[in-house]
Image (cartoon, rainbow, N blue to C red):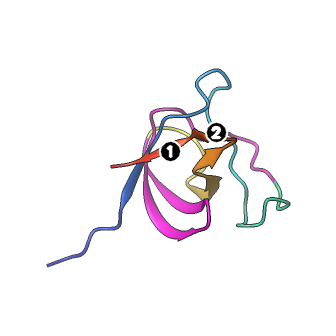
Amino acid sequence: AEVRAPRWEVIGGVDKGGIMVRVGQDLKSPQTPDRLATGSLVEELEFGGERLRYRLIEGSGPAEGWVSIRITGKDLLHRL
C-alpha cells in the first residue's frame, strides 16, 4: 500500500492574501513573489522545526516552497 504524505491546510494569512513562502528552509532565504493562498491544500515533503517544505495540491500559490507552520503563537497551517 502506498504511504501518503501528510497533508496540511493553509489557515493563516486571511488578511494578507495568504502566507509567505521562501525558496529555502532558512528564514533568510528569498521570498517567492506569490503567497500561498489561505484555504490551499499542500502535501508535506519535509518538515523540520516549525518549517514545512510543501508541494501544492489544491489552491493557488507557488507549486513548491518552504513555509512556517506558525508565527508568534498563531497557526498558519493545520495538519489534516
Q: Amino acid at mark 2?
A: Ile
The residues tagged by marks 2 and 1 sit, at their Cα atoms, a distance apart of: 9 Å
Instruction: Name the residue located 74 percent from the left edge and 49 percent from the top edge.
Output: 32
Q: Is residue 75 left or right of residue 21?
A: left
Q: Residue lying at the far left in this picture: please name it.
A: 1
Residue 44 belongs to the span the image colors magenta: yes
Point out which mark residue 77 bears. 1
Q: Residue lying at the far bottom in this picture: please name it.
A: 1
Tag 2 secondary structure? loop
Q: Is residue 35 left or right of residue 3?
A: right
Point out which mark residue 19 bears. 2
Instruction: Name the residue located 24 percent from the left edge and 75 percent from the top edge.
Output: 3
Is 24 rendered above or below residue 77?
below
Is 36 rendered above or below residue 63?
above
Q: Are marks 2 and 1 in contact (CB under 8 Å)?
A: yes
Which range of residues does the magenta coloring cover? Answer: 31-58
Q: Dot 2, crowdedness within 10 Å: few (<14), some or many (≥20)? A: many
Residue 2 location, quadrant: bottom left
Q: Residue lying at the far front in this picture: please name it.
A: 73
